[in-house]
Amino acid sequence: NEFIIDRPNARRHLAFGFGIHRCMGNRLAEMQLRIVWEEITARFSHVEVVGEPVRIRSNFVNGYSDLPVRLHV
């Protein structure tokens, strides 16, 4: 399992719904995430995962509740 943030098909997911049920704020959320990652990569040489991720799985939310990382200058 790898998280490749700059993969070619990164926008092909169902996280914000699909079709008529698509989230109205999805573009804002994508922009916020892009800015956060731009700022992190500008300030740190790399991000190291230092613990096991804890996943959330339900009918409504899939993701991580905990992902311990270390930011290296």
Image (cartoon, rainbow, N blue to C red):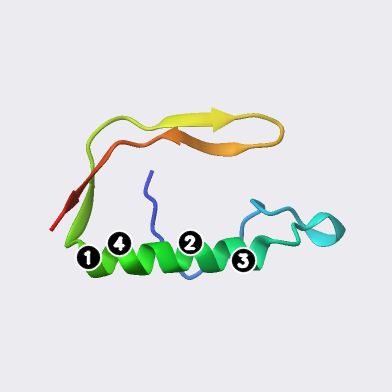
Q: Residue at x 37, y 49 (%)?
A: 2
Decide which of tag 3 and tag 2 comes sooner along the chain.
3
Q: Position of residue 27 (x, y in %)?
A: 64, 68
Quarter of the image for the N terminus: give it: top left
Question: Where is mark 3, residue-wise?
Answer: 28
Element at label 2 = helix
Q: Which residue is mark 1?
A: 43
> In screen coordinates, is 7 left or right of 71?
right
Point out residue 51 in the picture as x, y percentages from the top left corner.
26, 31
Q: Pick whichever of labels 2 and 1 is earlier in the sequence.
A: 2
Gap between marks 2 and 4 measured at Cα: 10 Å
Circles 4 and 1: CB distance less than 8 Å? yes
Residues 19 and 72: in front is 72
Residue 71 drawn above or below residue 68:
below
Cα–Cα gap, marks 1 and 3: 23 Å
SS category of the residue bearing label 4: helix
C-alpha gap between disc 4 and disc 1: 5 Å
Q: Position of residue 59 (x, y in %)?
A: 71, 32
Disc 1, SS: helix
Q: Which is nearer the N-term, disc 4 or disc 3?
A: 3
